[in-house]
Amino acid sequence: MGIEALEANSKPIEIFQANFRHLLLIKGQPVAEVLPGQRQKMEKLLADTGL
């Protein structure tokens, strides 16, 4: 039930700040760390609906 609840209450894709790190979450689960200084580029990439 834990993973299903996490997925149900999370955005499909988001960047989450944890302390001094930015994590890329997909369905609430961390899949990658966004490199320092690359958050804006990652946000633009995720916002591109043409991908």
Image (cartoon, rainbow, N blue to C red):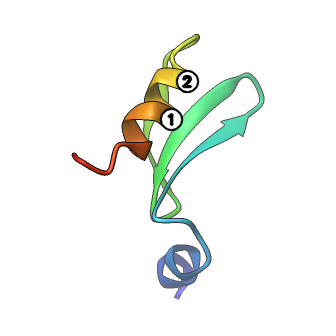
User: What is the residue that sits farthest to the left in this orientation?
Assistant: 51
**Which residue corresponds to the image point at 54% horizontal and 82% vertical from the top-left?**
8
Mark 1–mark 2 Cα distance, whole angstroms, equals 5 Å
Other residues around mark 2 within 10 Å, as few (<14) / some (14–19) / many (≥20): few
Q: In which quarter of the image is residue 11?
A: bottom right
Q: Where is residue 23 in the image (x, y as percent from the top left)?
A: 55, 37
Q: Do the residues labelled 1 and 2 touch (CB within 8 Å)?
A: yes
**Which residue corresponds to the image point at 46% horizontal and 64% vertical from the top-left?**
12
Residue 43, numbered label: 1
Q: Where is residue 13 in the image (x, y as percent from the top left)?
A: 46, 55
Q: In which quarter of the image is residue 19?
A: top right
Instruction: Indicate the secondary structure of the residue bearing disc 1.
Output: helix
Instruction: Indicate the secondary structure of the residue bearing disc 2.
Output: helix
Q: Quadrant of residue 40?
A: top right
- Residue type beneath disc 2: Gln
Other residues around mark 1 within 10 Å, as few (<14) / some (14–19) / many (≥20): few
Residue 40, numbered label: 2
Instruction: Answer with left or right where residue 17 lies relative to residue 22.
Output: right
Instruction: Answer with left or right where residue 49 lies relative to residue 47.
Output: left
In depth, the one of 44 and 20 nearer the eye is 44
User: What is the residue that sits farthest to the right in this orientation?
Assistant: 19
Residue 24, numbered label: none
Q: Where is residue 39 in the image (x, y as percent from the top left)?
A: 56, 24
In depth, the one of 16 and 5 nearer the eye is 16
- Residue type beneath disc 1: Glu
Instruction: Answer with left or right where residue 51 lies relative to residue 36.
Output: left
